[in-house]
């Protein structure tokens, strides 16, 4: 298809970019790290969402190539940040079915020179379920090397709680759907409260995603949520704008 060919060309010509969104401490709004998000603007097609081109790359078998270029760019950028800031990077579900993901990931970090302890990989519950034994081996290998694992979009999967017993994670990201409902819907408030309490008991760090207002940020802080991410703190921005953000906020 036209889209597939355009994406292949974009990868070859290094035209797929990566942007960064801050993840902050809710107690004092101090920036703790950034999530890398793929961005592609095609000359003919215009802006194409990663929600479209990531699944296409997965389906056509070139997600590894795409992801490697993105991780290399993201890691390069992270090297220009203060050393105590982490880089959070989305791993595709297909990559969790491929045993070579561990070595590919670690070799990029070593060639760029980024400490594996500064990398967090975001994975979804659905991805883990798709290939449980391979996924758990990859997760364990990466954690052995010092990489952290975040469970992304938490609460939207199909067997959230059981996964927490079978796999070792470091962090849980509460899905934006709960956050955007929290100020108007008591049920969402109770669910978020329960997730935070459970994660405290399991020694998991918690990030609330999609915070757009001060009221949401305050409410989550009050519920004991340590970290937040969302337009209220900062929209995804390119590497240069991210450095300017750091001059102002770090
Ligand atoms: O940035 P935005 O909200 O448009 O992202 C849409 C979807 O694409 C999200 O689910 C996000 O996790 C995913 N996504 C963005 N960048 C990457 C990436 O570099 N790799 C993978 N696998 N998914 C990504
Ligand atoms: O699936 P994942 O959680 O990785 O997707 C992250 C996506 O959420 C990114 O594409 C990013 O653009 C988007 N996002 C980040 N913060 C906000 C926000 O405050 N509101 C909305 N609507 N989307 C956000
Ligand atoms: Na994510
Ligand atoms: Mn998410």
Image (cartoon, grey):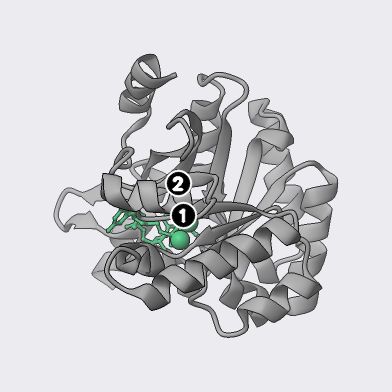
What residue do we see at 40% from left, 68% from top? 178
What residue do we see at 55% from left, 18% from top? 82
CB contact under 8 Å: marks 1 and 2: yes
Circle 2 residues within 10 Å: few <14, some 14–19, many ≥20: many
Task: Name the quadrant where ligand 2 sits.
Answer: bottom left
Circle 1 residues within 10 Å: few <14, some 14–19, many ≥20: many
Asked where in the image residue 133 lies, by quadrant, the reply is: bottom right
Residue on which the image places disc 1: 208
Q: Dot 1: what SS?
A: strand
Asked where in the image residue 130 lies, by quadrant, the reply is: bottom right
Q: Using residue 44 as the reference point, say whether residue 87 is left or right of it.
A: right
> Could you say where residue 88 lies in the image, as x and y percent from the top left?
55, 44
Seen from the viewer's position, the closer of residues 68 and 176 is 176
Seen from the viewer's position, the closer of residues 140 and 210 is 210
> Could you say where residue 164 lies in the image, as x and y percent from the top left?
72, 71
The Cα–Cα distance between marks 1 and 2, rounded to whole angstroms, is: 5 Å
């Amino acid at each position: 298809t036209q889209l597939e060919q355009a994406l292949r060309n974009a990868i070859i010509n290094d035209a797929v970019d990566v942007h960064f969104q801050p993840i902050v401490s809710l107690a004092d709004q101090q920036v703790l790290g950034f999530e890398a998000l793929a961005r592609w603007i095609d000359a003919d097609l215009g802006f194409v969402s990663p929600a479209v081109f990531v699944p296409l790359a997965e389906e056509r078998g070139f997600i590894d190539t795409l992801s490697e270029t993105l991780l290399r760019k993201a890691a390069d950028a992270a090297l220009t940040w203060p050393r105590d800031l982490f880089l959070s990077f989305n791993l595709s579900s297909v990559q969790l079915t491929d045993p070579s993901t561990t070595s590919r990931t670690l070799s990029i970090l070593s060639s760029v020179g980024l400490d594996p302890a500064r990398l967090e990989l975001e994975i979804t519950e659905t991805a883990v379920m798709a290939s449980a034994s391979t996924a758990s081996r990859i997760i364990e290998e990466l954690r052995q090397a010092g990489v952290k694992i975040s469970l992304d979009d938490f609460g939207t999967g199909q067997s959230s709680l059981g996964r927490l017993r079978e796999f070792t994670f470091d962090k849980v990201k509460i899905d934006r759907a709960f956050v955007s409902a929290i100020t108007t819907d008591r049920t969402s408030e109770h669910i978020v409260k329960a997730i935070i309490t459970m994660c405290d008991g399991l020694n998991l760090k918690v990030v609330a995603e999609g915070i757009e207002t001060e009221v949401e940020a305050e409410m989550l802080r009050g519920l004991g949520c340590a970290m937040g991410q969302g337009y209220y703190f900062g929209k995804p921005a390119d590497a240069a704008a991210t450095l300017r953000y750091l001059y102002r906020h770090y």
